[in-house]
Amino acid sequence: MATLLHLDSSLFPADGSASRAVTAAFRKAWEEQHPDGTVVYRDLAATPLPHLEAAGFTAAFSAPEKHTPEQRAAFAQRLELVEELEQADAVVLGAPMYNFTIPSTVKAWLDHVIIMGRTAGDESTLKGKPLTVVTSRGGSYAPGTPRAGFDYVQNYLEAVLGTMFGMEVDFVVPELTMAPTNPAMADLIPLYEASRDKAFQEAADKAKALATRLAA
Protein backbone atom coordinates (compact mmCIF):
# COMPACT_ATOMS: atom_id res chain seq x y z
CA MET A 1 0.00 0.00 0.00
CA ALA A 2 1.35 3.40 -0.97
CA THR A 3 1.52 6.42 1.33
CA LEU A 4 0.70 9.98 0.28
CA LEU A 5 2.10 12.90 2.28
CA HIS A 6 -0.32 15.83 1.97
CA LEU A 7 1.02 19.26 2.99
CA ASP A 8 -0.98 22.50 3.03
CA SER A 9 0.27 25.99 3.87
CA SER A 10 -2.45 28.46 2.87
CA LEU A 11 -3.38 31.04 5.51
CA PHE A 12 -7.02 30.62 4.55
CA PRO A 13 -9.53 27.84 5.27
CA ALA A 14 -10.55 25.31 2.66
CA ASP A 15 -13.52 27.32 1.39
CA GLY A 16 -11.35 30.38 0.81
CA SER A 17 -8.15 28.84 -0.49
CA ALA A 18 -7.46 27.86 -4.09
CA SER A 19 -4.42 25.78 -3.18
CA ARG A 20 -6.26 23.85 -0.46
CA ALA A 21 -9.15 23.15 -2.82
CA VAL A 22 -6.81 21.72 -5.45
CA THR A 23 -4.70 19.64 -3.04
CA ALA A 24 -7.97 18.29 -1.64
CA ALA A 25 -9.02 17.31 -5.17
CA PHE A 26 -5.67 15.57 -5.63
CA ARG A 27 -6.11 13.68 -2.37
CA LYS A 28 -9.72 12.72 -3.18
CA ALA A 29 -8.71 11.28 -6.55
CA TRP A 30 -5.78 9.46 -4.92
CA GLU A 31 -8.01 7.89 -2.27
CA GLU A 32 -10.63 6.87 -4.84
CA GLN A 33 -7.98 5.22 -6.98
CA HIS A 34 -6.09 3.70 -4.05
CA PRO A 35 -8.58 3.17 -1.18
CA ASP A 36 -6.20 0.88 0.71
CA GLY A 37 -3.43 3.47 0.71
CA THR A 38 -2.42 5.77 3.55
CA VAL A 39 -2.57 9.57 3.71
CA VAL A 40 -0.42 11.51 6.18
CA TYR A 41 -1.56 15.10 6.55
CA ARG A 42 0.36 18.10 7.86
CA ASP A 43 -1.06 21.64 7.91
CA LEU A 44 1.91 23.98 8.04
CA ALA A 45 -0.32 27.03 8.57
CA ALA A 46 -2.48 25.64 11.37
CA THR A 47 0.52 24.10 13.13
CA PRO A 48 3.58 26.07 11.99
CA LEU A 49 7.04 24.70 12.61
CA PRO A 50 9.58 26.77 14.52
CA HIS A 51 12.32 28.36 12.47
CA LEU A 52 15.49 26.33 12.26
CA GLU A 53 17.90 27.43 14.98
CA ALA A 54 21.60 26.88 15.58
CA ALA A 55 21.15 23.75 17.72
CA GLY A 56 19.16 21.94 15.07
CA PHE A 57 21.45 23.10 12.27
CA THR A 58 24.75 22.16 13.89
CA ALA A 59 23.42 18.79 15.05
CA ALA A 60 23.29 17.66 11.42
CA PHE A 61 27.06 18.07 11.18
CA SER A 62 28.13 16.23 14.32
CA ALA A 63 27.89 12.69 15.63
CA PRO A 64 24.73 11.92 17.69
CA GLU A 65 26.79 10.86 20.71
CA LYS A 66 28.32 14.35 20.79
CA HIS A 67 25.02 16.21 20.74
CA THR A 68 24.12 18.48 23.61
CA PRO A 69 20.64 18.03 25.11
CA GLU A 70 19.52 21.09 23.13
CA GLN A 71 20.89 19.67 19.89
CA ARG A 72 19.32 16.29 20.59
CA ALA A 73 15.86 17.77 21.06
CA ALA A 74 16.11 20.05 18.05
CA PHE A 75 17.42 17.34 15.76
CA ALA A 76 14.72 14.90 16.88
CA GLN A 77 12.11 17.20 15.38
CA ARG A 78 14.08 17.48 12.14
CA LEU A 79 14.37 13.70 11.94
CA GLU A 80 10.62 13.30 12.48
CA LEU A 81 9.92 15.54 9.48
CA VAL A 82 12.61 13.92 7.34
CA GLU A 83 11.38 10.40 8.07
CA GLU A 84 7.80 11.45 7.35
CA LEU A 85 8.97 12.67 3.94
CA GLU A 86 11.19 9.66 3.26
CA GLN A 87 8.45 7.17 4.16
CA ALA A 88 5.94 8.72 1.76
CA ASP A 89 5.68 7.22 -1.71
CA ALA A 90 4.31 10.48 -3.15
CA VAL A 91 3.83 14.04 -1.92
CA VAL A 92 1.35 16.80 -2.70
CA LEU A 93 2.31 20.26 -1.44
CA GLY A 94 0.07 23.33 -1.42
CA ALA A 95 2.36 26.35 -1.76
CA PRO A 96 0.44 29.50 -2.72
CA MET A 97 2.40 32.53 -3.85
CA TYR A 98 2.72 35.18 -1.13
CA ASN A 99 4.62 38.34 -2.06
CA PHE A 100 6.13 36.62 -5.10
CA THR A 101 7.47 33.59 -3.19
CA ILE A 102 6.52 30.65 -0.97
CA PRO A 103 4.83 31.00 2.46
CA SER A 104 7.32 31.31 5.31
CA THR A 105 5.84 28.14 6.81
CA VAL A 106 6.95 26.16 3.75
CA LYS A 107 10.42 27.69 4.00
CA ALA A 108 10.60 26.63 7.66
CA TRP A 109 9.63 23.07 6.70
CA LEU A 110 12.26 23.01 3.97
CA ASP A 111 14.96 24.30 6.32
CA HIS A 112 14.24 21.37 8.63
CA VAL A 113 14.17 18.65 5.97
CA ILE A 114 17.22 19.81 3.99
CA ILE A 115 20.04 17.70 5.39
CA MET A 116 23.16 17.50 3.26
CA GLY A 117 24.31 13.93 2.75
CA ARG A 118 20.86 12.57 3.47
CA THR A 119 17.94 14.30 1.76
CA ALA A 120 20.14 16.65 -0.28
CA GLY A 121 23.03 15.68 -2.49
CA ASP A 122 23.98 13.00 -4.98
CA GLU A 123 22.79 10.16 -2.75
CA SER A 124 19.53 11.79 -1.68
CA THR A 125 17.09 9.45 0.04
CA LEU A 126 14.32 11.31 -1.83
CA LYS A 127 15.67 10.78 -5.33
CA GLY A 128 12.92 9.94 -7.82
CA LYS A 129 10.06 10.41 -5.34
CA PRO A 130 7.10 12.11 -7.08
CA LEU A 131 6.00 15.46 -5.66
CA THR A 132 3.16 17.60 -6.99
CA VAL A 133 3.22 21.28 -6.03
CA VAL A 134 -0.03 23.26 -6.17
CA THR A 135 1.04 26.90 -6.39
CA SER A 136 -1.92 29.25 -6.67
CA ARG A 137 -1.55 32.97 -7.29
CA GLY A 138 -3.87 35.97 -7.39
CA GLY A 139 -2.59 37.20 -10.75
CA SER A 140 -0.69 35.64 -13.62
CA TYR A 141 3.07 35.21 -13.78
CA ALA A 142 3.13 32.99 -16.84
CA PRO A 143 5.80 33.49 -19.51
CA GLY A 144 4.98 36.53 -21.60
CA THR A 145 2.99 38.31 -18.88
CA PRO A 146 4.24 41.63 -17.46
CA ARG A 147 5.22 40.02 -14.14
CA ALA A 148 6.68 36.78 -15.45
CA GLY A 149 10.02 37.55 -13.79
CA PHE A 150 8.44 37.99 -10.37
CA ASP A 151 7.66 34.30 -9.84
CA TYR A 152 10.07 33.08 -7.16
CA VAL A 153 7.97 30.04 -6.30
CA GLN A 154 8.45 27.59 -9.14
CA ASN A 155 12.13 28.34 -9.79
CA TYR A 156 13.00 28.11 -6.09
CA LEU A 157 11.07 24.91 -5.43
CA GLU A 158 12.42 23.30 -8.59
CA ALA A 159 15.95 24.11 -7.40
CA VAL A 160 15.42 22.68 -3.91
CA LEU A 161 13.04 19.81 -4.53
CA GLY A 162 14.20 18.87 -8.00
CA THR A 163 17.92 19.64 -8.03
CA MET A 164 18.93 19.27 -4.36
CA PHE A 165 16.54 16.43 -3.47
CA GLY A 166 16.36 14.79 -6.89
CA MET A 167 12.59 14.47 -6.60
CA GLU A 168 10.26 14.15 -9.58
CA VAL A 169 8.62 17.59 -9.32
CA ASP A 170 5.43 18.59 -11.11
CA PHE A 171 3.46 21.83 -10.80
CA VAL A 172 -0.26 22.61 -10.91
CA VAL A 173 -0.83 26.37 -11.20
CA PRO A 174 -4.30 27.84 -10.60
CA GLU A 175 -3.93 31.55 -11.33
CA LEU A 176 -5.92 34.79 -11.36
CA THR A 177 -7.60 33.66 -8.15
CA MET A 178 -8.34 37.27 -7.12
CA ALA A 179 -10.45 37.92 -10.21
CA PRO A 180 -13.81 37.02 -8.59
CA THR A 181 -13.26 39.45 -5.69
CA ASN A 182 -11.27 42.28 -7.30
CA PRO A 183 -13.48 44.56 -9.43
CA ALA A 184 -10.44 45.69 -11.43
CA MET A 185 -9.98 42.08 -12.57
CA ALA A 186 -13.62 41.38 -13.44
CA ASP A 187 -12.87 40.92 -17.14
CA LEU A 188 -10.39 38.16 -16.21
CA ILE A 189 -12.99 35.97 -14.49
CA PRO A 190 -13.41 33.67 -17.51
CA LEU A 191 -9.64 33.11 -17.60
CA TYR A 192 -9.64 32.45 -13.85
CA GLU A 193 -12.44 29.91 -14.22
CA ALA A 194 -10.59 28.17 -17.04
CA SER A 195 -7.40 28.07 -14.97
CA ARG A 196 -9.29 26.76 -11.92
CA ASP A 197 -11.01 24.00 -13.91
CA LYS A 198 -7.73 23.03 -15.56
CA ALA A 199 -6.01 22.84 -12.17
CA PHE A 200 -8.69 20.56 -10.73
CA GLN A 201 -8.48 18.29 -13.75
CA GLU A 202 -4.68 18.20 -13.74
CA ALA A 203 -4.60 17.44 -10.02
CA ALA A 204 -7.09 14.59 -10.35
CA ASP A 205 -5.32 13.14 -13.39
CA LYS A 206 -1.90 13.28 -11.73
CA ALA A 207 -3.20 11.71 -8.53
CA LYS A 208 -4.89 8.85 -10.39
CA ALA A 209 -1.82 8.19 -12.49
CA LEU A 210 0.48 8.17 -9.46
CA ALA A 211 -1.82 5.97 -7.40
CA THR A 212 -2.05 3.47 -10.24
CA ARG A 213 1.70 3.53 -10.81
CA LEU A 214 2.57 3.05 -7.14
CA ALA A 215 -0.05 0.37 -6.54
CA ALA A 216 1.25 -1.73 -9.41
Image (cartoon, rainbow, N blue to C red):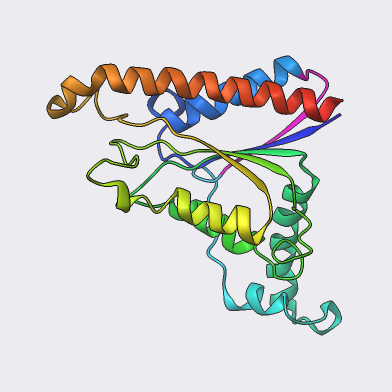
Question: Residue 34 at what x, y percent from top left?
Answer: 78, 20
Q: Is residue 49 visible in this depiction of the protein?
A: no
Left or right of residue 96, residue 92 in this image: right
Residue interval drawn in magenta:
34-43
Question: What secondary structure predominates along the stretch shown in magenta?
Answer: strand
Which of the 4 image quadrants contains residue 173? top left
Which of the 4 image quadrants contains residue 38? top right
Question: Residue 97 at what x, y percent from top left?
Answer: 38, 44
The single residue placed furthest to the left in the displayed view is 184
Residue at 70% from the left image edge and 70% from the top image edge: 116
Residue at 59% from the left image edge and 20% from the top image edge: 204
Left or right of residue 100, residue 86 in this image: right
Question: Residue 49 at what x, y percent from top left?
Answer: 56, 55
In the rendered image, residue 39 lying in the magenta stretch gets the answer yes
The single residue placed furthest to the bottom in the displayed view is 66
- How many labels were placed on the picture? 0
Q: Quadrant of the N terminus?
A: top right
Left or right of residue 52, residue 135 in this image: left
Residue 16 higher or lower than 87, as above or below: above
Q: Is residue 42 visible in this depiction of the protein?
A: yes
Residue 161 higher or lower than 22, as above or below: below
